[in-house]
Amino acid sequence: MECRKSCGACCIAPSISSSIPGMPKGKPAGVRCVQLNSDNSCRIFGLPERPKVCSSLKPSREMCGESRQFAVEYLCKLEELTKLGGIDMSKILVFMYNDMADFEISYATHLLGHELSKEIVPCAYEKNTIKSKGGLLFTPVITVAEAKVDDYDGFLIPGGWNPVVKTEMLDLIKAFYTSGKLVAAICAGPRYLAKAGILDDVKYTTSIVEWTQARREAFNNEDDPFPRENFIDTRVVRDKNVITSKGISFVDFAIEIADYFGMFKHPDDKEAFYNMISGR
């Protein structure tokens, strides 16, 4: 089946979280894409800058029906189901490495996967089995170098004493940040954000309150990468699209990430949930 001429329903009705030329933070539902011509044809059709999500959406009888109005109504209904948690095809990328503190992100991935229906995608520098500090084994499905920011809604980085920081990791972090997508790191994880330079623009926290000689030696005699003027000595900090946390605050971290993705409709709901989980 081919696209119906002068339709453009899929360029107006649904939300698009991927960056679009002229709309770097994506497109809200019901808003006309800036790349849509007056005849409802796509200006960037077939070009590499067209988001993959657009290229992957193919016309079908089920979606398009017999008229443009049918397609608009179908896509609006699909968008509504997504908001209600009935359908969510978005993905979250999670960085993994040997001796990572798996407990620091396990509750966050539970809320994202179970409560918000997001697909969790583990990545690493190589596709080798990862053994966490707790002894659990994880299998990455993609390498950091292969990961593309347009395919994901967020990037999670656990803590641990991993001195290896590769260029592809820093480039990926910067791509998520500049695209307006979530970058979340906990405990020593914010060190990656510091080395990528994004903590220069936001407030943050970390378990590395001071850069001691022991820290320096643990990271191959590295100088303190943190912009200390932006550090806040608290449990969790959310600034713009960046969430950072101390390692002991993994529940706070998880709830803040869930809140970022709209799990709580009102601030009172978020507080009540936290109180229930923490036993307050």
Image: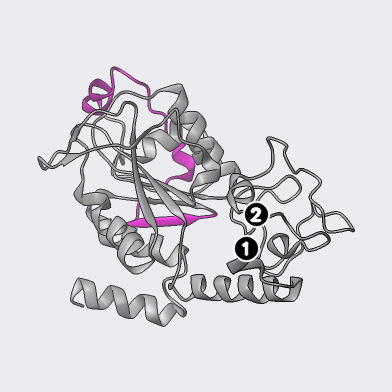
Which residue sits furthest left? 135
Q: Is residue 238 left or right of residue 67?
A: left
- Are there few (<14), some (14-19), or many (20+) residues within 10 Å of tag 1? some
Q: Quadrant of the N terminus?
A: bottom right
Contact between labelled residues 1 and 2, with CB atoms less than 8 Å apart? yes
Residue 2: horizontal and vertical position, in percent? 71, 54
Residue 155: horizontal and vertical position, in percent? 43, 46
Give the distance between the C-alpha atoms of the residues marked 2 and 1, in whole angstroms.
8 Å
At 19% from the left and 50% from the top, the residue drawn is 103
Q: Is residue 18 left or right of residue 257?
A: right
At 51% from the left and 37% from the top, the residue drawn is 148
- Are there few (<14), some (14-19), or many (20+) residues within 10 Å of tag 2? some
Residue 58: horizontal and vertical position, in percent? 62, 54
- Relative to the observer, which residue lies in front, 34 or 59? 59
> Does residue 200 appear in this view?
no
Q: Quadrant of the C terminus?
A: bottom left
Q: Which residue is mark 1?
A: 15
In this rendering, the label closer to the viewer, 2 or 1: 1
Secondary element at image label 1: loop
Label 2 amino acid? Gly
**Residue 117's quadrant in the figure?**
bottom left
**Residue 259's quadrant in the figure?**
bottom left
Q: Is residue 29 inside the magenta stretch?
A: no
- Please report whichever mark, 2 or 1, sits nearer to the chain's N-terminal start: 1
- Relative to the observer, which residue lies in front, 40 or 255? 40
At 31% from the left and 57% from the top, the residue drawn is 108
Label 1 amino acid? Ser
Q: Which residue is mark 2?
A: 26
- Region rendered in magenta: 213-240
Image height check: is 268 above or below 95?
below
